[in-house]
Amino acid sequence: MAIYRFRLSFDDYDEVIREIDIKSTQTFEDLHKALHRSTGYTAEKSSSFYVSSDHWIKGDEIAYLPTQKKTDRGVALMEKSKLSSFIEDPHQKFYYIYNFDRPYEFHVELIKIILQTDPSIEYPVLFKSIGEAPKIFDANNFPVEAVATSPASNDFDFLNEMDFVPEDTEEIEAMDGRGITTSSKNEDADDEESDTDDYNGDEDYHEDEYDSKEDY
C-alpha cells in the first residue's frame, strides 16, 4: 500500500501551505477532513475536489455535502471515492473549493509517493505546516471562531481566550465597539445600583404605609 504526500496551498495565500501524508486507499473525505484539522476550519461545509490539468483547469468533480442538483446529476462523493481511483499522474493535481457559501480555493498537488507505510503512524497525518490559515469572516465581516482543538470548558475566560493585552489600544477599541469594555461594565453596574435604589425606595414606601395604618 502506497502513501501519497499532497501539498495543499491557498489560491490567494501562497505562503500558507499544508503537506499531508495519506494512504492511497483512503478517501477524498479523509483528505478533506485532515486538511481542516490543520486549518482549524469546520469540515462540515459543502466542498469539492476537481481533477485538474497542469494549468489548474477543472475536470471531474468529487463532492462533499453536494446540492440536490449535483446529487441528481450523479456527482462522485468524497466518502465513496478512493484517492487511488483518481490518480493518473505521479504529479496529479486537484483544484479544491472549500465552503461554496463563502469559498476558499486551494491548489492540491501530489508531490511524493512513498511505497511503505509506517505502522507507528495513524494516517492521514500532517507532514508539514507553513503559515497560518486566514480567518473566515461571516456575512457581517466578523471573524468566525475556528473549531476548538481541545475539550471545551464550561467556564469561558474572555480575557484569556482573546489573549488580551491591556496596552493594546487597538484591541481595547475593538472591544469597546462591541460593548464589552470595563467602562461598559461600569455602566451596567450603575444601572444595577439604580435599580437597587428604586427597590429600596419601594421598601421605604411600604414601611411608611404600614406605619400610617398602625397610626390609624
Image (cartoon, grey):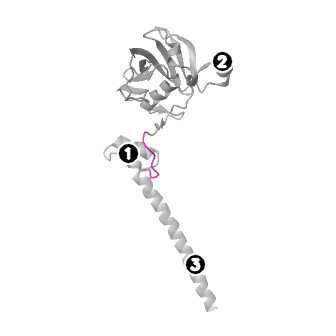
- Label 3, residues with CA under 10 Å away: few <14, some 14-19, many ≥20: few
Q: Quadrant of the N terminus?
A: top left
Task: Name the dominant secondary structure of the magenta segment.
Answer: loop
Given residues 167 and 11, the one toward you in this image is 11
Out of 109 and 212, give the one closest to the viewer: 109
Residue where numbered disc 1 is placed: 172
Please provide the residue range marked out in magenta.
Answer: 149-156
**What mark, if any, has residue 74 been given in the picture?**
2
| Nearest-to-viewer mark from 2 and 3 | 2
SS class of the residue under badge 1? Answer: helix
In 3D space, how far apart are the residues under numbered discs 3 and 1 (Cα atoms)? Answer: 44 Å
| Amino acid identity at mark 1 | Ile
Mark 3: which secondary structure?
Answer: helix
Residue 135: give x, y in percent of width and height. 44, 32
- Res. 119 image quadrant: top left
Q: Secondary structure at mark 2?
A: loop
Hey, what amino acid is under mark 2? Gly
Q: Which badge, 3 or 1, is on the more N-terminal residue?
A: 1
- Are the residues flagged by discs 3 and 1 in contact, CB closer than 8 Å? no
The x, y position of residue 92, in whole percent, is 46, 11
